[in-house]
């Protein structure tokens, strides 16, 4: 296995942690927000097609809301990249993750306020939480896409699982990133499992845990050095 610097270990650990958060958020959105996935946009495109086709239990409005705010989050990620492009890239990640944490905290506040007063989320509160989480996860999707660390996308595992099997098939015994791929799968699986358990208490607790973990990842970026990979992403100074 390739040797890693301390900064790379912190970075990769943060990305694993955010993969776990994805499992939490999607558990909350699927179970408690009306069968949508506010982190995994691929699923929502399929669900929107199902809803248009008349599948019961799915909502065109909810799926469209997720997709709309997910796109807005990706747009904001691009703007943040342009704004902070010449700064150390660990600070760029800190800003992006910090914005996500703020949105998750906001979603937690909405869930706590309304559930504590009636036990059930009213429609407006539900759509507010969907919008806040989809915006935050959309921004994460855009940021991690720009960051481009192989097999640590934090939200989508389709290609990760396929690559894991393909590499073992084509080059048995020579799969240098298999640990990273397996780790990503396990973290998202664990996040989904823990998320369902947290929902037995409340959606606010799940969103609060997600926000705290994301905030921890934000601080980790601030207190580490920029990696070589990050430095290569910065435009050359003239």
Image (cartoon, rainbow, N blue to C red):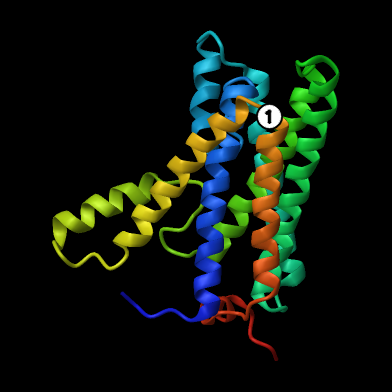
Query: x%, y% of residue 217?
Result: 64, 61
Quadrant of the rendered image containing residue 72 = top right
Regarding mark 1 in the picture, which secondary structure is present there?
Answer: helix
At x 48% / y 27%, what residue is drawn? 46
Q: Say whether residue 171 is visible.
A: yes
Q: Which sits in the foreground, 99 or 85?
A: 99
At x 86% / y 19%, what residue is drawn? 117
Q: Which sits in the foreground, 167 or 65?
A: 167
Q: Residues within 10 Å of mark 1 (few under 14, many from 20)?
A: many
Q: Is residue 174 above or below residue 18?
A: below
Query: x%, y% of residue 115?
Result: 79, 22
At x 62% / y 16%, what residue is drawn? 59
Q: Is residue 132 above or below residue 216?
A: above
Quadrant location, the N terminus: bottom left
Residue furthest front in the image? 201
Q: Which sits in the foreground, 99 or 196?
A: 196
Q: Say whether residue 78 is visible.
A: no
Query: x%, y% of residue 93?
Result: 66, 65
Residue behind mark 1: 203
Task: Tally the marks.
Answer: 1
């Amino acid at each position: 296995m390739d040797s890693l610097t301390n900064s790379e270990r912190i970075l990769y650990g943060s990305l694993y942690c955010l993969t776990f958060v994805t499992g939490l958020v999607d558990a909350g959105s699927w179970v408690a927000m009306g069968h949508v996935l506010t982190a995994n946009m691929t699923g929502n495109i399929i669900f929107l097609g199902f809803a248009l086709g008349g599948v019961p239990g799915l909502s065109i409005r909810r799926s469209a809301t997720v997709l709309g705010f997910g796109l807005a989050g990706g747009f904001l990620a691009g703007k943040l990249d342009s704004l902070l492009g010449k700064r150390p890239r660990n600070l760029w990640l800190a800003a992006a993750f910090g914005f996500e944490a703020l949105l998750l905290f906001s979603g937690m506040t909405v869930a706590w306020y309304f559930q504590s007063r009636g036990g059930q989320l009213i429609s407006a509160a539900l759509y507010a939480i969907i919008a806040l989480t989809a915006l935050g996860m959309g921004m994460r999707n855009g940021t991690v896409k720009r960051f481009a660390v192989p097999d640590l996308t934090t939200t989508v595992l389709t290609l990760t699982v396929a690559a894991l099997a393909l590499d073992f098939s084509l080059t048995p015994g020579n799969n240098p990133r298999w640990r990273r791929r397996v780790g990503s799968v396990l973290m998202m699986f664990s996040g989904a499992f823990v998320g369902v358990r947290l929902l037995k208490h409340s959606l606010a607790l799940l969103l609060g845990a997600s926000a705290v973990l994301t905030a921890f990842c934000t601080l980790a970026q601030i207190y580490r050095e920029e990696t070589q990979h990050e430095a290569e992403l910065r435009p050359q100074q003239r």
